[in-house]
Amino acid sequence: MSSEEDLKIKNADSLSQQRATRRKRSKLKDLRKQEKESLQGASSTSKRREVKGYYEEQRGKIMDVSVNPPQSENQDGANNDTSQAGIDDSVEYGSSGGGGGDTITLDVVLSDNTAGQAEVTGAFL
């Protein structure tokens, strides 16, 4: 792909993000206006707290949409299942150097949500 095509794609992405940000700000502005009008009509402290709680929740819903935008690209191997994944080179294996009886110790979470260890024996290298 040429750099001109890359630039067009980046510009389209940027424009899309700008539009999304404008929509979010507009929604928040409208929500603040509605909250102000509702608070003026509230006759008691408990009613004002109720109104503020409701609008705080609504603001959270608007913000959650933009805080976690969808990922445009997957990381390497993200679509692979575990049978296609390779062995992590950072794991320390047993001391016998790749024979059939190597043992590794894994840190695990037990069924009662506590930490534990499990030893696995087999050919790892």
Image (spheres, helix red, strand yellow):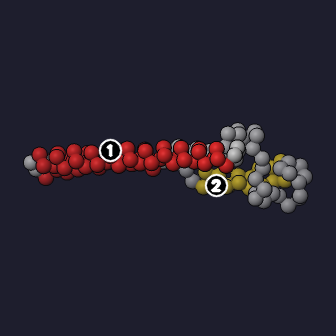
Q: SS for tag 2? A: strand
Q: Local crowd at mark 1 within 10 Å, few (<14), some, or many (≥20)?
A: some
Q: SS for tag 1? A: helix
Q: Residue sitting at 76 percent across and 57 percent down? A: 91
Q: Where is residue 61 in the image (x, y as percent from the top left)?
A: 37, 44
Residue 46, can we see it?
no
Lower position in the chain sequence, tag 1 or tag 2: 1
Question: Which label lies toward us, 1 or 2?
Answer: 1
Residue 24, can we see it?
yes
Q: Considering the image in quadrants, where does the N terminus appear?
A: top right
Q: Residue sitting at 16 percent across and 46 percent down? A: 37
Q: Which residue, given by chain and number where applicable, does mark 2 sit on?
A: 116
Indicate the amino acid at tag 1. Answer: Lys
Indicate the amino acid at tag 2. Answer: Gly
Q: Where is residue 32 in the image (x, y as percent from the top left)?
A: 25, 49
**Which mark, by number, is residue 27?**
1
Gap in Å between the C-alphas at discs 1 and 2?
48 Å
Q: Residue sitting at 85 percent across and 61 percent down? A: 95
**Which mark, by number, is residue 2?**
none
Q: Report the front residue among 2 and 57.
A: 2
